[in-house]
Amino acid sequence: MTFYVLLWAIAFALLLIIDMVWLMWLGRGFYVEEIGSLLLEQPNLIAAFAFYALYIAGLVYLVIAPAAEADSVMKAVISGAVFGLVAYATYDLTNLAVMKGFTLKIALIDMVWGMALSA
């Protein structure tokens, strides 16, 4: 149990830092340009925390711990990329299907980001 909690805490810190760099600086202009009318002025931090907590729990349980037990970086990278693609595609393709103003361009870029972040 301690092993999983430690993996979760490390993954939480790393993913949060990396994702914030993307969302607040590197990709911010792109998101504002593509879907600015859909964005809140201030993000809902409780919802954001809930997403990161659950997403990283899934990542630890389904990707990181099995790869660590197998002592395989390649397994972690490939499984992480697949996990990220499936999770981000669920969000992006659903939004593309039901939301006005959500673009294919944003969906594709976001899915690639989910793969990269999770790998």
Image (cartoon, grey):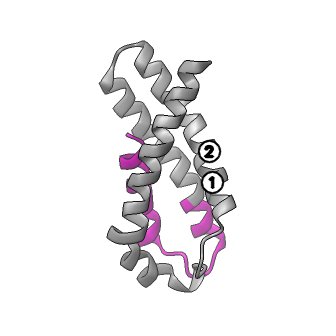
Tell me the residue at 56%/81% (across/down): 101
Residue 2 x, y percent position in the rendering: 58, 20
What residue span does the magenta drawing correspond to?
Answer: 92-119
Please tell me whether residue 66 is drawn above or below residue 63 in the rendered image.
above
Q: Residues within 10 Å of mark 1 (few under 14, many from 20)?
A: few
- Type of amino acid under label 1: Phe
Asked where in the image residue 21 lies, by quadrant, the reply is bottom left
Closer to the camera in the image, 22 or 90 = 22
Q: Is residue 62 visible?
A: no
Closer to the camera in the image, 96 or 19 = 19
Residue 108 x, y percent position in the rendering: 41, 62
Residue 50 x, y percent position in the rendering: 67, 51
Please tell me whether residue 32 is drawn above or below residue 61 in the rendered image.
below
Tell me the residue at 43%/56% (across/down): 19
In the image, 34: left or right of 58? left
Residue pointed to by mark 1:
49
Dot 1 falls on a residue whose secondary structure is: helix
Residue pointed to by mark 2:
53
